[in-house]
């Protein structure tokens, strides 16, 4: 799983002209799921996201996590994170998981993040054409890959 985590002061997702999800302070997470991802990847990523200390403390150091700042999560599925551009100019998405694999993992991550954070998670809609708006705070953007745990 690849997660692009953006620290935001606000973010929203609109589908067919209607706002589906909206948050204030927190994380906008773009999530790419590959056919090789498992529940172990999901568990590791969920804990990493909730424990990530990228909010400023009183000394203006990135030292606070999402719970401490009472932040929220807007989670958006994005298969294009697994694009391969090795050959030619047209990306290949062969590594992106098919919906029958990706949707259950995506839904489980929503439930797990909600349980760990202690509040509902805002989401987009799997497979929909979405318009995502955000104000990246910092800017701070972190990329986490569950297959590359360095």
Image (cartoon, grey):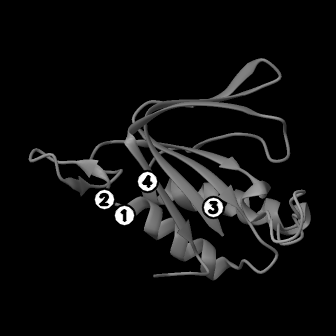
| Image-quadrant location for residue 89 | bottom right
Question: Is the residue 36 above or below the residue 15 in the image?
Answer: below
Is 21 on the left-hand or right-hand side of 55? Answer: right
Is 66 on the left-hand or right-hand side of 97? Answer: left
CA gap, disc 3 and disc 4: 12 Å
> Which secondary structure lies at badge 4?
helix
> Which secondary structure lies at badge 1?
helix
Frontmost of labels 2 and 3 is: 2
Question: Of label 3 and label 1, which has the lower sequence position?
Answer: 1
Q: Nearer the viewer, residue 16 or 139?
A: 139
> Which secondary structure lies at badge 2?
loop
Q: Which mark is residue 53?
A: 2
CA gap, disc 2 and disc 1: 6 Å
CA gap, disc 1 and disc 4: 10 Å
Residue named by callout 4: 117
Where does residue 28 sit, x and y in percent of width and height?
A: 53, 44
Frontmost of labels 4 and 2 is: 2
| Label 2 with label 1: CB-CB less than 8 Å | yes
| Label 1 with label 4: CB-CB less than 8 Å | no
Tell me the quadrant of the picture where the C terminus can be found: bottom left
Q: Which mark is residue 51?
A: 1
């Amino acid at each position: 799983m690849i997660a692009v985590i953006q620290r935001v002061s606000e973010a929203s997702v609109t589908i067919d002209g209607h706002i589906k999800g909206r948050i204030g302070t927190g994380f906008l997470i773009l999530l790419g799921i590959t056919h090789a991802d498992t529940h172990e990847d999901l568990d590791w990523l969920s804990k990493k996201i909730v424990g990530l200390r990228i909010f400023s403390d009183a000394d203006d150091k990135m030292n606070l996590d999402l719970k401490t700042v009472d932040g929220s999560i807007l989670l958006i599925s994005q298969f294009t994170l697994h694009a391969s551009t090795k050959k030619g100019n047209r990306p290949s998405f062969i590594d992106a998981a098919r919906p029958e694999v990706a949707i259950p993992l995506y839904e489980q991550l929503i439930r797990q993040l909600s349980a760990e954070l202690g509040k509902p998670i805002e989401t987009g809609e799997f497979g929909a054409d979405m318009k995502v708006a955000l104000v990246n705070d910092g800017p701070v953007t972190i990329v986490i890959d569950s297959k590359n745990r360095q």
